[in-house]
Amino acid sequence: MRIPRALAALWLTAFCVSAVAQGRELPDFTRLVEQQGNAVVNISTTQAVRRSAAPQVPGIEDEEVLEFFRRFIPRQQPGPGPRPESRSLGSGFIISPDGYILTNAHVVEGADEINVRFTDKREFKAKVIGTDRRTDIAVIKIEASGLQSVRFGDPSRLRVGEWVLAIGSPFGFENTVTAGIVSAKGRSLPQENFVPFLQTDVAINPGNSGGPLFNMRGEVIGINSQIYSRTGGFMGLSFAIPIDVALDVQKQLREKGRVARGRIGVVIQEVTRDLATSFGLDRPRGALVNSVEKGSPADRAGVEATDIILSFDGKPVEGSSDLPRIVGSTRPGSQSAMEVWRKGATRTLAITVGELQEDRVAAADRPRGQKPAETPANRLGIVVAELSADQRRDMSLDSGLVVTDVRPESKADVRKGDVLLTLVHKGQHTELRSVEQFNKILAGLDKSAVITLQVRRGESMAFVTISGLTDKG
């Protein structure tokens, strides 16, 4: 089929017009950079390290091995005192005309000397006002006045797909500008429980840390903090600390020198689809309580293991990672309302928030092996026995069944020595008190049933979901 020339020309014209129109819609960052670039600074630090006269290799006498160390480990001149050797680079930005600067805690950590350099080549020595390693925020101060400071935006108004811009000093190249879009909001990263990160595809590299992330209105909406990389360089995944989190931290650091965070004293886990089904919840959401610390705010408020926390202080808890952030940002001593899902219904508990002193992490320690008398495997493919009086006393338990064997056909993610405390099916919670009771419950379930077991493993608690039972029983 041949296309008439007139029609082909019309299509080509339309395509070109569309391309030009799209080109006009591309963002122009020039004014933003001109207006805000002077508020961004380069930060370099120096840390004193001790130098020895020669590499010492304890326990190695082989001359060839020692020669290897002599050749490939630089020989250093002896010196009794510390000498400035270790240097690092980062970025920061002015938040007040009198010289307060925000940056990352890891940029200034361990520094003996901090040097701040402006775009006009002015340099100042800075002192640390305070740092918070949990959020990777640091406040430093230089002796200056009348400085240009940044304007702050609202990260909650930021939309995924929106253009953003970073200014920093990657690899020491001062005032480097990179741009991209917001890829996601509220990201949780491993070991980072207190920051709902902004994810972008803005090019961030070593030296960008601590620099500002701007929206198109020239407002700072985040602090560039880290990247995901398998090479050490930028791979399209950058993460920024929302500016509202950073400003709350810097306010506490300036006023008190430290950050006070709330805690309630629970160990939690994610609610999977199978767990939601077992607990009779409409969909996977909330934070499932594994255990409650005795005497903690949660204990005093009446929180129970197997509760699913759906909201805290009026804020929804969609995933388990939301709870530490919400509770952590709540001032210790304040009264809060907490909505929980318990045995097929919601209820609201009043709780007085405590103060976080140390991290509490659920461990999966290998338990002490118990050897009760064996019984035939049940429909889960495991062998259980009732706890002895001594075991109940040692574990401070009223009831429970100990796993004595796990057969090859078992689908249950349990181990020998685990103690089964509760069985949950379709929102119904049953305390396990005898082998006969447990096996009778299993015998009455469909082969495709989804159940959840509350398991004590060592000193920790966990919930284990099993989909499908064997035909044995």
Image: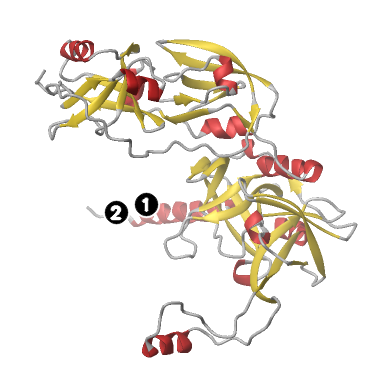
Q: Is residue 205 above or below residue 222?
A: below
Q: Compared to 461, does 26 lie above or below?
A: below
Residue 85 shows up from this direction: yes
Q: Report whether 221 appears left or right of 457.
A: right
- In the picture, residue 385 is in which quadrant? top left
**Residue 468: x percent and y percent?**
19, 24
| Residue 17 position in % (x across, y down) | 51, 53
Measured as percent of width and height from the top left, residue 197 is found at 56, 44
What SS does tag 2 mark?
Answer: loop
Please report contact status of discs 2 and 1: CB closer than 8 Å, yes or no.
yes
* Furthest-left residue in this view: 472
Q: Which residue is mark 2?
A: 3
Q: What amino acid does circle 1 point to?
A: Leu
| Residue in the foreground of this view, choosing between 151 and 313 | 313
Q: Answer above or below: position of 67 versus 216.
A: below
Point out the image quarter for the C terminus: top left
Residue, disc 1: 7
Q: Residues within 10 Å of mark 1 (few under 14, many from 20)?
A: few
**Residue drawn at 61 percent across, 46 percent down:** 134
